[in-house]
Image: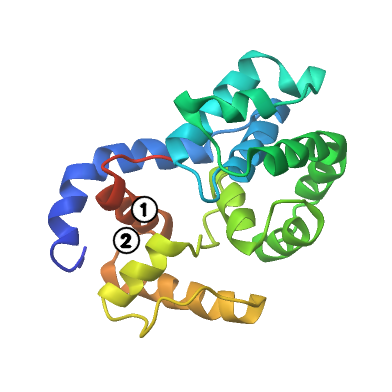
Amino acid sequence: MRLPPPLDEQYEHYAAAIERRLEEFKAPKSTHDIFYEFCYCICTPQSKARNAWQVVEKLRAAQFYEQGFDPTPVFANPAHYIRFHRTKARRLLALRTQFGAIGAALAQQSTSQELRRWIAQNVAGFGLKEASHVLRNLGRFDVAIVDRHILRNLVRYGVLARAEQPRTEAQYRIIERAFVNFARTCGIELQALDLLLWAIETGEVLK
């Protein structure tokens, strides 16, 4: 492994937790598990990841998949507040309605890039970043989650000149390739590096 300092020391600290999380991503998922991974990725934009996961766990316990109730009160709880909760509540209800089509798309065994494009174009609340996120959590490790923390770190380590959010799929894939090449240069798996950079900023290895 050729991680630059201080990433090398940080990796030693987080390596076991990162490996456990990657194994969780690769584990087989039930239909319910897949549904709630999509819920989670709808909740996370501009909200704390831990709050999003707490909300998803409450929705699972209340059988949101089976019953389809309005999740707005769960989102609005100050203990795990989710920003734009009314919009995200509508998106979760829409997700439940179209989840059959999503399951069919996932079952077609398309490439990750094709699936990402389909999700971004067809599922409300998903762009390329969120689509990459859910696919990663479902065990597809050949796509990158190009979010703010990745962009900041790619600038920090001289991979990119500016931390500009991609506006098109072509721009997204240019940054994605840069991230993949950086991980290869560091001698670490792409998703392990993603989790490491996230953990350095937040202090924990989350989804």
In the picture provided, is 207 more to the left or to the right than 122? left
In the picture provided, is 101 more to the left or to the right than 47? right
Viewer-nearest residue: 42 or 11: 42
What quarter of the picture does the N terminus occupy? bottom left
- Does 22 appear above or below 140? above
Pointer 2: what residue?
Answer: 188
Q: Residue at x 68, y 54 (%)?
A: 126
Percent position of residue 124, x then y: 76, 51
Percent position of residue 179, x then y: 42, 71
Viewer-nearest residue: 66 or 191: 66
Q: Residue at x 64, y 22 (%)?
A: 59
What amino acid is found at the position of numbered circle 1 in the picture? Ala
In the picture provided, is 161 more to the left or to the right than 170? left
Pointer 1: what residue?
Answer: 192
| Callout 1 crowding tier (Cα within 10 Å): few <14, some 14–19, many ≥20 | some
The quarter of the picture where residue 166 lies is bottom right
* Pointer 1 with pointer 2, Cβ within 8 A: yes
Residue found at the far bottom of this picture: 161
- Does 162 appear above or below 116? below
Percent position of residue 78, x then y: 49, 27
| Callout 2 crowding tier (Cα within 10 Å): few <14, some 14–19, many ≥20 | some
- Does 162 appear above or below 23? below
What amino acid is found at the position of numbered circle 2 in the picture? Ile
| Colouring scheme applied when the structure was drawn | rainbow
Instruction: Report, in whole angstroms, how far the alpha carbon at label 1 lies from the one at label 2.
Output: 7 Å
Q: Is residue 183 visible?
A: no
